[in-house]
Amino acid sequence: MAWPPLDLPITPPYPPMEARLDDALPAGASWWYEPKWDGFRCLAFKDGGTVVLQSKAGQPLGRYFPEIVAAVAALPAPRLVLDGELVIPAGGGVSFEAMLQRIHPAESRIRKLAAETPARLVLFDLLVDARGRALVSEPLEARRAALEADGPRPGAEFVLSPVTRDRAAAEAWLAGRAGTDGVVAKRLGVPYASGDRTAMVKVKRERTADCVVAGFRRGKDGRDVASLLLGLYGDDGRLHYAGHASSFGREERARLTALVEPLAAGGAPRGGARGGEAHGGDPQGGRADGFGFTGEAPGGPSRWARGRSTEWTAVRPVLVVEVGWKHASGGRFRHGVRLLRFRPDKAPEQCTFAQLGAAPSDDGEIAPR
């Protein structure tokens, strides 16, 4: 892709500073903490009337978020390079599903969505100030001060991401009080390290849900269970496919096989012969014989995981499991979930999509509205 010429000390594609994933927040006076937003990382370049939005992967984002391009272009500063996260506010938090809808080939569709569900740019760093001076060699505290002094004023299009040195407050964000995706810890006194992960740590929030096991897939050897297919009940009273749990050890696979095989329906496995995890599901895959899913079921081949078998075996939906998950959108777990435990105290009908709702928000300063 050919980027427009920009008279800036930093030009696209410019790899943003990233964070390494960890299980716990670091402690100590050398760190501060910010919410982690579930959106699209975005570097915004402004040189006069020319504005470029760049993704974390170095791809252009401007055509998908015309309202943000216009907002950056309208800023009084003649030059800026901003680092932030594009989000779409929804229900006291943000909607990743709404973000995905923006990646559409039709400009008319994008502009319609931009008017109906406008995005916001949550800002957390300033790489080039209004005088055209690069700040990447400055420490984090200086860049944040410059962002607060010279960056966009908070409003309809821009949000200044909160920051705290209080680890207890950060733990509250991690627990879900802010409706965010987790917490990022940033080391104080360090410059902006493009493409590096050494000075930032991210801890994602894991939430739990009770799901119904409605099917399974076997491993490559065709014997033991490799993944459990999970369902949740919708408002229509039907059991819909919501995702899968996998990554089991050898002993656990054998134990699961002994549990689910007696619940299996007779006949040949369902699904395609080769392909991957269904991306959209199969609305016609529901069964009426008391086995498997009665609503949307796992579908056929997927471009995301070619070469994997999509055959699956339906089981009587009586087994309830608790799983840990971090991302969900459109009624689906976005990634494989972690099996935590069995829940014999739970009735399958209690496992509903309400569990995937937005994390509660009791702090209006955090959740962008």
Image (cartoon, helix red, strand yellow):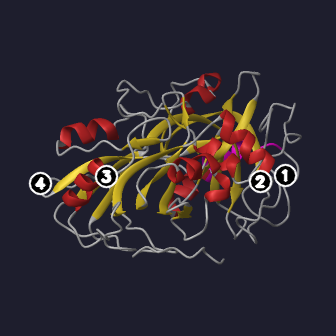
Q: Is residue 131 left or right of residue 252?
A: left
Query: Circle 2 sits in a helix, a strand or a loop, which is it?
Result: loop
Image location (x, y in percent) of residue 163:
26, 45
Which amino acid is tagged 3? Asp
Looking at the rendering, the stretch of residues picked out in magenta corresponds to: 257-265
Residue to which mark 3 is pinned: 150
Residue 51 or residue 85, whichever sits in front: 51
Which amino acid is tagged 2? Trp
Q: Nearer the viewer, mark 1 or mark 3?
A: 3
Mark 3 vs 4, N-terminal side? 4
Which amino acid is tagged 4? Gly
Residue to which mark 2 is pinned: 312
Residue to which mark 1 is pinned: 270
Residue to which mark 4 is pinned: 28
Mark 2 vs 1, N-terminal side? 1
Mark 2 vs 4, N-terminal side? 4
Query: Residue at coordinates 37% horizontally, 24% vertically from top-left?
Result: 362
Q: Nearer the viewer, mark 2 or mark 3?
A: 3
Mark 1 vs 3, N-terminal side? 3
